[in-house]
Image: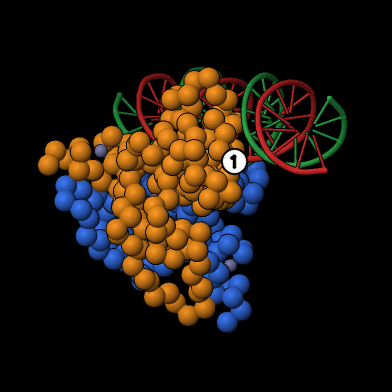
Chain colours: A blue, B orange, C red, D green
Amino acid sequence: MTEIEKTLENKSVRPTAMRILIYKYMAEKDIAVALTDIENAFAKADRTTLYRTLKTFEEKGIVHQIDDGTGISKYALCEPGCNCELDQDLHLHFHCGNCDETVCLTEHKIPHINLPEGYIAEDANLVIKGICEKCSGQ
Amino acid sequence: MTEIEKTLENKSVRPTAMRILIYKYMAEKDIAVALTDIENAFAKADRTTLYRTLKTFEEKGIVHQIDDGTGISKYALCEPGCNCELDQDLHLHFHCGNCDETVCLTEHKIPHINLPEGYIAEDANLVIKGICEKCSGQ
DNA sequence: ACAATAAATGCACTTCCGTTGCACTAAGAA
DNA sequence: TTCTTAGTGCAACGGAAGTGCATTTATTGT
Ligand SMILES: [Mn+2]
Ligand SMILES: [Mn+2]
Ligand SMILES: [Zn+2]
Ligand SMILES: [Zn+2]
């Protein structure tokens, strides 16, 4: 049994061929991926299957969904210490306006914000837009 | 000439009847509004007109668009000191999971974030999700 | 190995929101 | 008034998310 299969089973997700391929695809990329990206990478697979795979992965804490403001949902594998299901230690995301790629900045946590009286924070999303290190050429 | 008409002309937007109505509608609300909200408020008007009005307002710096993570674009009037077109002094937004309302927290600016080497920040979006003061009951 | 059961996949279709093209109308300039 | 531009209304398109149901594949129990 491979590493990926073990990882999936640890999260109580049955390691089907499709799921292993999708996991591997996401693991090889260092950027967040959209459903369409996976669809293009695996032309033979049906969009619904990929869609539901991502949904399952998200529910089981294997990936987290990213709203980078483009209107297209992105997904990235959760790091070992990723507490995204607990809504704590939330990291920020960076979207490059040049290459349209979105990356997790897992080391950069969202700073704590003091809200006005009566407001209760449960979750947060911080997206920085600009030029990524690949595109800025340094 | 009313205050609203003056405001629109100052921003080089011709104060048509429809535009004045939309501006007034947004000014009376203390929450961000979606295109659908305006559509429901002015059943006689066409969605396209409202859509293009909001677009014009945004281009002229009268309103700013808000991405609160719901997937539906919201809009709010820019405060007198709102520098949203300059991408500075960006304030954060709060979305209530209970009443589904989104508000501008204009006093709360997005803190400066130190990015990794090579990353250039140009814009930022910070949305806090939780329970608003109306719904938390205090 | 077999049947019974449950999970995963594939296809078709729907919904929602944003967006655009084009014709028509109202408003401002000459 | 005539010319020209800006605003509005109607219809249709588009992308992306989501759902219902039939079919296939895997797992369980005998
Ligand atoms: Mn991330
Ligand atoms: Mn705002
Ligand atoms: Zn880039
Ligand atoms: Zn609320």
Q: Is residue D14 left or right of residue B88?
A: right
Work out which quarter of the rendered image holds the C terminus of chain A and state it: bottom right
Q: Quadrant of residue A90?
A: bottom left
Q: Is the residue indicated by label 1 positioned so its CB lies within 8 Å of ligand 2?
A: no
Q: Is residue B107 left or right of residue B135?
A: right
Q: Inspect the image, locate mark 1, and give the three-letter code of the amino acid beneath it.
A: Arg
Residue B102 picture location, percent across and down: 34, 42
- In which quadrant of this rendering is ligand 4 seen? top left
Q: Is residue A108 left or right of residue B17?
A: left
Q: Residue at x 53, y 35 (%)?
A: B19
Query: What crowding class fits label 1: few (fewer than 14 Cα within 10 Å), some (14-19), or many (20 or more)?
Result: few
Work out which quarter of the rendered image holds the N terminus of chain A and state it: bottom left
Q: Is residue A80 visible?
A: no
Q: Is B108 or D3 nearer to us in this picture?
A: D3
Residue B36 picture location, percent across and down: 47, 30
Q: Is D30 or A118 nearer to us in this picture?
A: A118
Q: Is residue D30 left or right of residue A133?
A: left
Q: Is residue B27 visible?
A: yes
Residue beneath disc 1: B14
In the image, farthest residue toward the left: B138
Q: Residue at x 28, y 34 (%)?
A: B99
Q: Residue at x 42, y 44 (%)?
A: B76
Residue A124 picture location, percent across and down: 32, 54
Asked if A118 appears above or below B101 in the picture, the reply is below
Q: Residue at x 50, y 74 (%)?
A: B119
Chain hosting mark 1: B
Q: Is C4 or A54 nearer to us in this picture?
A: A54
- Badge 1 marks a residue whose secondary structure is loop
Q: Is A69 or B87 nearer to us in this picture?
A: B87
Number of marks in picture: 1
Asked if A83 appears above or below A54 in the picture, the reply is below
Residue A25 picture location, percent across and down: 54, 57
